């Protein structure tokens, strides 16, 4: 995870949820220089997540063993709900342990990010820290309001269902109350999504600044048409947008920066930017190592939640046809899709910016007239061709937009299987009804 002045708000909030049990060591000037694991924060995080996990499973067993269960009415619903809850618990536990054991990766990642910022500041302005702070605050506020509203509506809907089936001397609302620890775990899960997204977008921001610096280093490059590389044709739209952004920035921020700083030699620029790109590519692997196990659990939870929510929505639409319950299931389907994209899209954006460098260097090699600069560009090109760093979940799968199609196929397959099991559960009931 990135820990800096612009991201410290997200860092401090993540400590409340037990995901970042670190304390920051500062210099006398207030500059962050090191991060240490704090024993109190470690114990606090473990206590929070395991207490919530224990209370969650206690609520599940209470609902299963009650005379009038709320969510565990059939064998299929018992399996689906138990898996639904279990993946959230496992993802939260993995997130806490990744924070505890990921300190060496966090230290190296932040060292590389700070080094990249120092080197890039010689070529292009870093931008406002306040703007980055507001981006983090906006992301947390958006996610917090959305998940809070969804949880409040979900609790209200289940209380409404409990009132319909309750009998004398039996409080069905206690079944709903037993799931409150499960709802609390969602805040830990969503905070993990925010931490990962900000870490990936932080690397993407360095890649973007590097690409703009390459444009600025070769002014003649802006006068020639851009020819995209076939192997990265999937990033053409993003590349075109970046061209427009680059032209604006070259006319504003980078020109003023060039006035106050002497222009370095082209060869030094290429060597520095090649080093930064290699360092940020290593940073991608460091983020994957930090969050690897938790990412695997989160992707699994997204898959199971999308399957389970789609299943319950379909059952409701063809069964009781409760409009309120159908709408809440549709809302949860949107939230789980949003969770999934909150993991995938930052990785995709970072990959686009990384491959964008390959496109720029290819065009520079075509237009550059300086033989020594062209040799260094060719070395840079070979480095980029050999670079295969990408975000992964424990090395088992790459996280980019290609995973979306795999998820769509898996969701369709599992939905068909669950519907078949549902039909098997309904057959004995139909047989008894016909006999009567």
Image: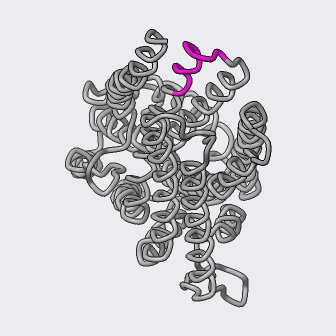
Return the residue nearer the eye: 39 or 90.
90
Which residue occupies 67% across, 61% down?
10
Horizontal arrangement in the rendering, residue 363 relative to residue 314 (left or right):
left
Q: Is residue 63 magenta?
A: no
State the image coordinates of residue 33 (x, y, percent, origin top left): 58, 82
Q: In front: 208, or 340?
A: 340
Please tell me whether residue 389 is drawn above or below residue 411 in the rendered image.
below
Identify the residue at image location x=38%, y=60%.
293
Q: Nearer the viewer, residue 254 or 433?
A: 433
Q: Relative to the observer, which residue lies in front, 67 or 205?
A: 67
Task: Give x and y (percent) for residue 255.
Answer: 63, 45
Q: Is residue 360 left or right of residue 137?
A: left
Q: Residue 320 falls in which quadrant of the image?
A: top right
Q: In this rendering, would 211 be left or right of 332?
A: left
Query: Which portion, as a residue range, is magenta?
Result: 312-321
Q: Residue furthest top?
A: 434
214, above or below 245, in the image: below
Q: Is residue 227 visible?
A: no
Does 226 appear above or below 303? above
Residue at (58, 15) in percent of width and height: 317
Task: Tell me the chief SS of the magenta region.
Answer: helix
């Amino acid at each position: 995870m990135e820990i800096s002045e612009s991201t410290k708000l997200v860092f401090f909030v993540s400590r409340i949820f037990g995901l970042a049990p670190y304390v920051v060591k500062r210099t006398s000037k207030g500059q962050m220089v090191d991060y240490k694991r704090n024993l109190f924060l470690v114990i606090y995080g473990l206590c929070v997540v395991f207490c919530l996990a224990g209370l969650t499973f206690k609520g599940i067993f209470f609902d299963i063993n009650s005379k009038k269960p709320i969510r565990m009415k059939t064998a299929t619903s018992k399996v689906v709900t138990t898996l639904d809850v279990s993946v959230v618990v496992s993802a939260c536990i993995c997130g806490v342990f990744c924070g505890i054991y990921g300190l060496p990766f966090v230290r190296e990642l932040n060292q590389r990010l700070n080094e990249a910022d120092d080197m890039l500041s010689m070529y292009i302005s870093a931008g406002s820290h306040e703007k980055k702070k507001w981006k983090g605050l906006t992301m947390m506020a958006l996610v917090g309001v959305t998940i809070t509203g969804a949880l409040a509506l979900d609790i209200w809907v289940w209380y409404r269902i409990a009132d319909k089936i309750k009998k004398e001397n039996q409080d069905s609302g206690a079944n709903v109350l037993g799931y409150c620890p499960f709802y609390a775990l969602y805040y830990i899960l969503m905070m993990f999504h925010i931490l990962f997204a900000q870490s990936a977008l932080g690397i993407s921001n360095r890649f973007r600044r590097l690409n703009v610096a390459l444009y600025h280093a070769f002014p003649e490059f802006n006068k020639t048409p851009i020819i995209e590389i076939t192997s990265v044709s999937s990033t053409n739209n993003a590349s075109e947008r970046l061209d427009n952004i680059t032209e604006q920035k070259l006319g504003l921020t980078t020109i003023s920066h060039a006035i106050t700083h002497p222009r370095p030699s082209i060869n030094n620029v290429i060597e520095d930017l090649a080093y930064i790109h290699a360092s940020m590519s290593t940073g991608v692997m460091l983020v994957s190592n930090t969050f690897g196990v938790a990412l695997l659990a989160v992707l699994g939870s997204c898959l199971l939640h999308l399957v389970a929510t789609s299943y319950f929505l379909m059952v409701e639409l063809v069964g009781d046809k409760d409009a309120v319950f159908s709408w809440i299931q549709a809302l949860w389907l949107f939230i789980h899709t949003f969770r999934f994209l909150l993991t995938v899209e930052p990785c995709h954006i970072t990959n686009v910016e990384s491959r964008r460098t390959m496109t720029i260097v290819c065009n520079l090699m075509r237009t550059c007239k300086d033989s020594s600069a062209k040799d260094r560009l060719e070395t840079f090109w070979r480095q980029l061709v050999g670079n295969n760093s990408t975000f992964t979940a424990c090395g088992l799968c790459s996280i980019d937009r290609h995973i979306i199609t795999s998820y769509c196929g898996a969701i369709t397959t599992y939905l068909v299987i669950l519907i078949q099991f549902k039909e098997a559960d309904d057959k004995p009931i139909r047989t008894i009804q016909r006999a009567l």
